[in-house]
Image (spheres, rainbow, N blue to C red):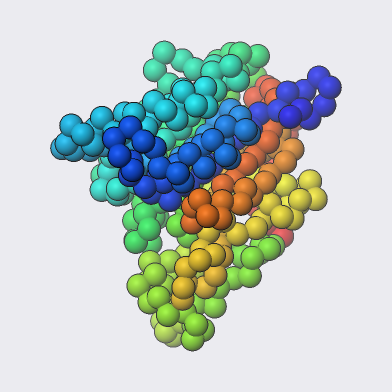
């Protein structure tokens, strides 16, 4: 796809394939849901950056059996070979669904050691953090990460979110005219396991006090209880990113590109007693590179996963301009209305 006769598109995809499509049916035989995701959805779309948030069987713990380690390597190598991309896996944390990033090397420049491993125990699932660049703008890093926030702990998610701001902090406020300061970009994509600020959202806010909310443990995982006994959705990560000047590409598409469907739900469709579909899979981009977004799609993965994928299409020309700071940044909270 191109965004103009002289402008190549860059395709960013976030996919939460439920438990990596399940284990091998037998040694060396990849499961159908994995093949449906990679062969049926990803390969035809040719992503240039791919964030995966449940690499359950593509990564193994150090104490895994030799058979489990071999199966994980087979699957991870198959993913890279099928897509023609270079893969980076985060280390295992307490969670059983590790994260990973795959990069098309013909689209981005990668340094000698582009991955940074996060070993702090604050992460239930460490993010996959890979630094990219564009040959047209040498020396300007694009700090990227695929993350999977804690599903069970609002305080844990808050701690993780503050750690994400260490990546956002690399961007700083280098505005037009400050060419002597080091520039950087930041892209964070993942399963937030909590909700966006409800203002302007297409999906109605959950009424956690309604009688059809029957999964009480899930309610405790996703809400804060107020002194009057009412429950309110956790939106901490979204608020923190907005305060730090980061922007959601789905909001940009809805507000600036007349694409309201970009704000469609990505998960929760099939869950019982949890309030219905929600937009918990999201991306965040810095105030310059967000303006290179030209299209955002929610990719239907019904029958393949319990989450839909997100596709963000960027104008390479506009991204180059953003990295060069040829225009002003988008103001914090500008897309929430």
Q: Is residue 150 visible?
A: yes
Location of residue 171 in the rendering, given as x and y in whole percent from the top left corner: 54, 32
Q: Residue at x 79, y 46 (%)?
A: 257
Q: Residue at x 57, y 32 (%)?
A: 43
Q: Residue furthest right?
A: 5
Location of residue 4 in the rendering, given as x and y in whole percent from the top left corner: 82, 26
Q: Is residue 107 above or below residue 200?
A: above
Q: Nearer the viewer, residue 194 or 27?
A: 27
Viewed as shown, does residue 121 lie left or right of 239? left
Location of residue 232 in the rendering, given as x and y in whole percent from the top left corner: 49, 73
Q: Residue at x 38, y 62 (%)?
A: 154
Q: Nearer the viewer, residue 177 or 171?
A: 171
Q: Is residue 168 above or below residue 279?
A: above
Quadrant in the picture for residue 218: bottom left
Q: Nearer the viewer, residue 98 or 201?
A: 98
The number of discs equals 0
Viewed as shown, does residue 102 lie left or right of 295? left
Location of residue 282 in the rendering, given as x and y in whole percent from the top left corner: 55, 49
Q: Quadrant of the C terminus?
A: bottom right
Q: Quadrant of the N terminus?
A: top right
Q: Residue at x 54, y 35 (%)?
A: 39
Q: Is residue 169 visible?
A: no
Q: Is residue 154 above or below residue 262?
A: below
Q: Nearer the viewer, residue 276 or 121?
A: 276
């Amino acid at each position: 796809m191109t965004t103009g006769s002289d402008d190549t598109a860059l395709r960013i995809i976030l996919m939460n394939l439920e438990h990596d499509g399940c284990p091998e049916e037998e040694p060396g035989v990849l499961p159908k849901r994995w093949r449906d995701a990679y062969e049926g959805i990803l390969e035809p779309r040719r992503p240039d950056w791919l964030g995966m948030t449940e690499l359950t069987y593509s990564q193994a713990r150090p104490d895994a059996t030799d058979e489990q380690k071999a199966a994980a390597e087979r699957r991870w190598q198959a993913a890279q070979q099928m897509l023609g991309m270079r893969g980076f896996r985060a280390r295992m944390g307490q969670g059983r669904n590790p994260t990973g990033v795959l990069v098309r090397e013909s689209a981005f420049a990668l340094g000698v050691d582009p991955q940074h491993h996060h070993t702090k125990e604050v992460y239930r699932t460490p993010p996959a953090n890979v630094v990219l660049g564009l040959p047209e703008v040498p020396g300007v890093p694009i700090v990227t990460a695929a993350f999977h926030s804690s599903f069970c702990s609002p305080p844990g998610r808050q701690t993780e979110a503050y750690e994400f701001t260490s990546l956002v902090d690399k961007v700083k406020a280098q505005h037009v005219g400050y060419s002597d300061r080091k520039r950087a970009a930041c892209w964070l994509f993942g399963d937030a396991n909590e909700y966006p600020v409800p203002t302007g959202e297409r999906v109605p806010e959950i009424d956690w006090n309604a009688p059809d909310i029957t999964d009480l443990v899930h309610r405790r995982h996703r809400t804060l209880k107020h002194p009057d006994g009412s429950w309110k959705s956790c939106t901490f990560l979204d608020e923190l990113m907005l305060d730090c000047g980061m922007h959601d590409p789905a909001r940009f598409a809805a507000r600036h590109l007349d694409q309201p469907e970009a704000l469609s739900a990505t998960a929760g469709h099939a869950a019982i007693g949890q309030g219905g579909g929600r937009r918990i899979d999201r991306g965040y981009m810095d105030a310059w590179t967000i303006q290179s977004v030209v299209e955002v799609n929610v990719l239907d993965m019904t029958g393949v996963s319990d989450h839909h994928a997100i596709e963000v299409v960027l104008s390479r020309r506009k991204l180059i301009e953003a990295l060069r700071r040829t225009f002003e940044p988008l103001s914090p909270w500008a897309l929430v209305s």
